[in-house]
Image (spheres, grey):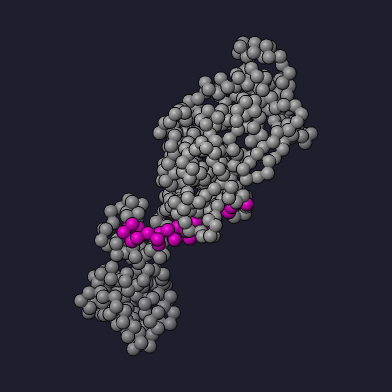
Amino acid sequence: MTAGRMPPRVRIAPSPTGDPHVGTAYVALFNYAFARRHGGSFVLRIEDTDRARSTRASEEAIYQALRWLGLEWDEGPDVGGPHAPYRQSERSAIYARHAAELLRKGAAYRCFCTAARLAELRERQKREKQNFGYDGLCRSLAGGEAEQRAAQGEPCVVRLRVPEGGSTTVPDLLRKPVVIAHAEIDDQILLKSDGHPTYHLANVVDDHLMGITHVLRAEEWIPSTPKHVLLYQAFGWEMPVFCHLPLLRNKDRSKISKRKNPTSLDWYRDGGFLPEALCNFLSLMGWNPKDGSEVFGLERFLAEFEPEAINTTSPVFDLDKLEWLNGEYIRALAPAALAARLQAFLRRDLDAERLARIVPLIRERLKTLARFDETAGFFYAAELPLERALFQAARGLSDADRATALAVALALIEGAPAIEPQSLEAALRDLARARGWSAGDLFMCLRIALTGKTATPPLIESMAVLGRETCSKRVRAALELLAR
Ligand code: GLU
């Protein structure tokens, strides 16, 4: 997209209800990338028109999650900016003024229909299998009469007067223009009876007043766009470029939902995903570099991304793939950097020197930071919960052999001045050969005794980190268990 001569201004406009949604991060990422690539501005606007469901805690959580991902905004409720306030609940007077303008122009009208009448209308439309929508009863009220009734305090809403006959064309950067007959468009409520705006009015007014040039938002807003186009025309404003991003989907292709996928960004942060991996993953949901690579940093996305290249076929949000990608990012970190991430994530004071020795051993296996305890917990455990049945994994050995194997290995461990991986491994292999055991079985017995698990980081190197004393203590405990 050529951004024109003026740098673009883009925005995200999340509603602060519930947990910060992964869809918000996805849309934020694409807007952020577009703004950064063209030296434009990225605005964060809080759309809290749903007063009952919006909370400050949710707003705060959105900020934290986006900052965690590194998607900083240039203007927003918390950082201010030339178009403040950026929270819709603080802009009521602006919307009322604009609703009045539409009333004056005849592009909107007051509707006094009661909730009971609207419910009845809905019932009738349902019975007659018609589309739901307002039937236009109040469209023909004379302006003077309507203003008088409103002035006398009769509750009313303000509705968009969708022109009769004709159609509206909705342009979209990624799609062919869609032509919608006006008969298909409902006379949308713009201002509720409590004087607060609906999404449609507030969204269009703000996008205009905030100088938004490109609206990159999720596909689910396509059905609202004809109403927005009519509003821009009614105000006589230039429209932004609309670009609807493909919706994230569950594996079964339904719209991403909590039931089938974790949708809260907090879940990903607390689950030990790296923000850069999640950003990479989310950018893949609508874009691929030309060379087909899948692992690329934000820098590259910012440098190469153009909205025209967005792939509109519904991207599947595949958690397994995200885990794989996260593992790639974890492995790409230098050991010291990974150790620092782990310290920060676990908020535990892990002995830095020891951690630096552990990290290279677990890096290959670690899919998320949160799996640290599962993977490396045995290095820290005071006592290992051991199960006798586990030793059956050393399949080629009898019970008696397993005990012998541990006893002989114990002698080796205790006889050496220190655990020196190379010589210890050679000695263990010699031992297995001499006894006619497979080295694998011998190592398995030791692995279980030392870690309580059958699959672990490299054993001998782990033994060196555990130290001679811990190793001998654990092998003794295992021998006692086997002797019972
Ligand atoms: N408040 C809407 C949301 O929650 C904004 C949609 C738009 O970007 O226009 O996603």
Asked if residue 391 is positioned above or below residue 277 in the image, the reply reads: below
Where is residue 271 shown, x and y percent of the image? 43, 52
Q: Residue at x 35, y 54 (%)?
A: 341
Residue 187 in percent (x, y) is at 68, 27
Q: Is residue 445 left or right of residue 137?
A: left
* Depicted 410 relative to depicted 132: above or below: below
Q: Which residue of the protein is positioned furthest toward the left in this rendering?
A: 417
Q: Can residue 162 be seen? A: yes
Q: Is residue 2 magenta?
A: no
Front in this rendered view, residue 119 or 136: 136
Task: Name the chief secondary structure element in magenta.
Answer: helix
| Position of 233 relative to 294 (above/below) | above
Quarter holding residue 213: top right
Comparing 436 with 345, the one in front is 345
33 or 194, which is in the foreground? 33
Total numbered circles = 0
Residue 6 lies, in percent from the top left, at 51, 36
- Residue located 47% across and 37% down the image: 41
Quarter location, residue 423 = bottom left
Name the residue: 34% across, 83% down: 429
Q: What segment carries the magenta color? A: 313-339
Quadrant location of the C terminus in the rendered image: bottom left
Residue 52 appears in the picture as rendered:
no
Looking at the figure, which quarter contains the N terminus? Answer: top right
Q: Is residue 268 positioned above or below 374 on the image?
A: above
User: Does residue 24 appear left or right of residue 354 in this picture?
Assistant: right
Left or right, 461 with respect to 389, comes to left
Residue at left offset 37%, top offset 59%: 333
Towards the viewer: 37 or 10: 37
Residue 266: x %, y % from top left: 45, 46
Task: Based on the picture, tell me whether residue 329 belongs to the magenta stretch.
Answer: yes
